[in-house]
Amino acid sequence: MKKVLIVGAGKGGSALLKMFHETKLMDVVAIVDRNDDAPGIKAARDMGIQTSNHWKDVLTNDIDVIVEVTGDDEVFATLRKASAVHTVVIPGDIAYIMAQLVEEKEQLIATLKTATTKHDLIFNSTHDGMIVIDERGLVTHMNPSAEKMIGKKRKEVIGSYILHVIPTSGLPRVLHTREVELNQELLLENGKKMITTRIPLIDENGKLFGAFAVFKDITEVVHLAEEVTNLKEIRTMLEAIIHSSEEAISVVDEYGNGILINPAYTKLTGLSEEEVIGKPATADISEGESMHMKVLKTRRPVRGVRMKVGPKKRDVVVNVAPIIVDGVLKGSVGVIHDVSEIEQLTSELQRARQIIRTLEAKYSFDDIVGTSEEMMLAIEQAKLAAKTPATILLRGESGTGKELFAHAIHNASDRKYHKFVRVNCAAISESLLESELFGYEEGAFSGARRGGKKGLFEEANNGSIFLDEIGELSANMQAKLLRVLQEKEIVRVGGTKSIPINVRVIAATNVHLEKAIAEGTFREDLYYRLNRMPIYIPPLRARKQDIPALCERLIQKLNQDYGRNVEGITDDALAYLLSYDWPGNVRELENVLGRAMIFMKYTEVIIERKHISLLHKPKEQEHLSSPESSRVHQPLAVLVEQYEAKVIASVLQSCQGNKTAAAKKLGISIRNLYYKLEKYGLDKKSMQ
């Protein structure tokens, strides 16, 4: 548990102390305030927590977090300078928001656990056999009723291929066809005859993640329907069996009049014996043809017919077989299955998966690895930006993690329970991009869907939309995007009506937008709309101290992807990685580690120097080549940035550090100059 020092024991500090103490989120080691009568001081004494009139008396190196609640910027700055390197100093309002978010997360998880318990209760208490498989055909769930019917224990079955458990199962076929199979006959190895319904499990994105089977044991009923030889002699036994069955059963005579129903039939249809016995077989049908009459006419059984029965129009599937004694037709017997229960359970399972997907954000700020000053600055800016509705522009080279930041910003905002739509502006042709972003009306162009189609901006309403490669937009699309940002409304292709939207735009680019403006390929007014909250994500070569932690995280991820058990990397291999400039950034690092793991033997669990192959020579080998040769092999973007940094530094020095004069001399805005100074680290050098 993190150790916390609270500086300021007024109303805010007292509230934070109470929250930390009650939720056990952090261990408050001390609280400081000049006023001995401050409410936080009194509360801390009652809790047995150390108090002091000055933070110097209680500040130690083992404190992880300092929460400054005085609101005094000077105190905040002093605490940051005086605290240890690993100690995080945060304002009190941010700490309060973070604590509230954690508390809300715990409440949501508790709600999810309750919902999961209810679903497990439904799954395990039903008398129907149920089996669930994943997309590979491996059994993931099986209820107790299925254990009894199949004759195999759950622990023996889970993780096995379905055809090894039930050789006659049709679930692999359902995985292939993605089609529902209703009330199919299934014969098990133990001789039991089943009626089963198989349903593919498909999420809202159309992705198949498994299949689900529900089956009922109809062995006794089918034997009675097909093999009975004297209905009158065994009527008493038949009635006892039918009445004890949990399957809804009805029997009619050779004229089609009802002669027998069981309690399960009454429960399902809502019809009593007085309403069925002696009445025509059509008495219980709300919609559909009487299968009893069809069987009596054709003398052939029918199976898996959908219809609605009873006053409540229950949706059912029926199987009906003729009763023939010594070649003489004596009537027919029908077994009725309620499909609404299966559909309801499937809906509940899908709903549970939606809740899980909502609570489990794909990426958050915890997934961003980096302790370097440059990366911490980017993360701090992104966290602040997440709390505002402002448009955000993520800048950085390819492979630095701009999309990761976009996910984290969305999931840290108040829009996290709404959609997060991702669009790669460079991957969609200009002719399709407008209709994809803004949608289209019916008849807008040939091939348009009937009724039109919502665009991605409408899909992301109340959520966030991530526009990657924004610098690749055409001039026409730039103008349309500018209107969306200004008016907060869109017009579908082929339409005239404006549709208001509430969408947070997160844009990203690795293009030098200022240069693009100068060249006339990017609109200056759109640039200022997008650049309201710019966040520069540093390249990997500028934060090499993060490489060890990145390697550890990436090895864990690749172990899961490749099914390996690699434990780490040697110091020699790590030093080799640190000597490289990483033009492809984190994406290239992941590729290098993944390639190393692929070529490792399965008995090897540590990545060594011999396993690593780089596309370019690391710095340790640069002395073997001439300086000019090394420069030629560097990416053009790197050379341009190096030259730009030298020019800015030279002009700034000639202006004796006057940034306004330097910006004027360079022909750029003062805001743009500050961005470049921060990007190249020149601001810190000029202050030294």
Image (spheres, rainbow, N blue to C red):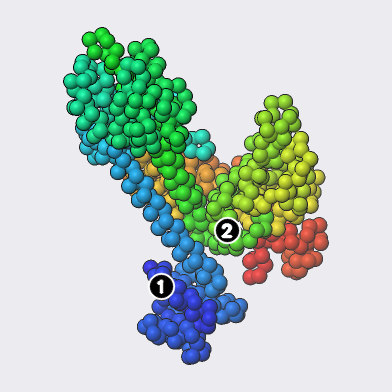
Q: Choose top left, top right, bottom left or bottom right for residue 27.
A: bottom left
What residue do we see at 51% from left, 70% from top? 95
The residue pinned by badge 1 equals: 22
Q: Are there few (<14), some (14-19), or many (20+) residues within 10 Å of tag 2?
A: some
Q: CA distance from mark 2 to mark 1?
A: 25 Å
Q: In screen coordinates, is 232 left or right of 573? A: left
What is the three-letter code of the residue carrying label 2?
Answer: Asp
User: Is residue 257 visible to us here?
Assistant: yes
The residue depicted at 45 percent of the width and 49 percent of the height is: 356
Indicate the amino acid at tag 1: Glu
Given residues 642 and 495, the one toward you in this image is: 495
Q: In this rendering, does residue 61 appear at all?
A: no
Q: Secondary structure at mark 2?
A: loop
**x and y, in percent, of residue 161 in the image:** 31, 30
Rendered-image quadrant of the N terminus: bottom left
Residue that sits furthest to the bottom in the current view: 36
Which of the two residues, 295 or 573, is positioned nearer the viewer here? 295
* Residue found at the far top of this picture: 327
> Where, by quadrant of the figure, is residue 387 drawn?
bottom right
The earlier-in-sequence mark between 2 and 1 is 1
- Residue that carries the numbered disc 2 in the rendered image: 414
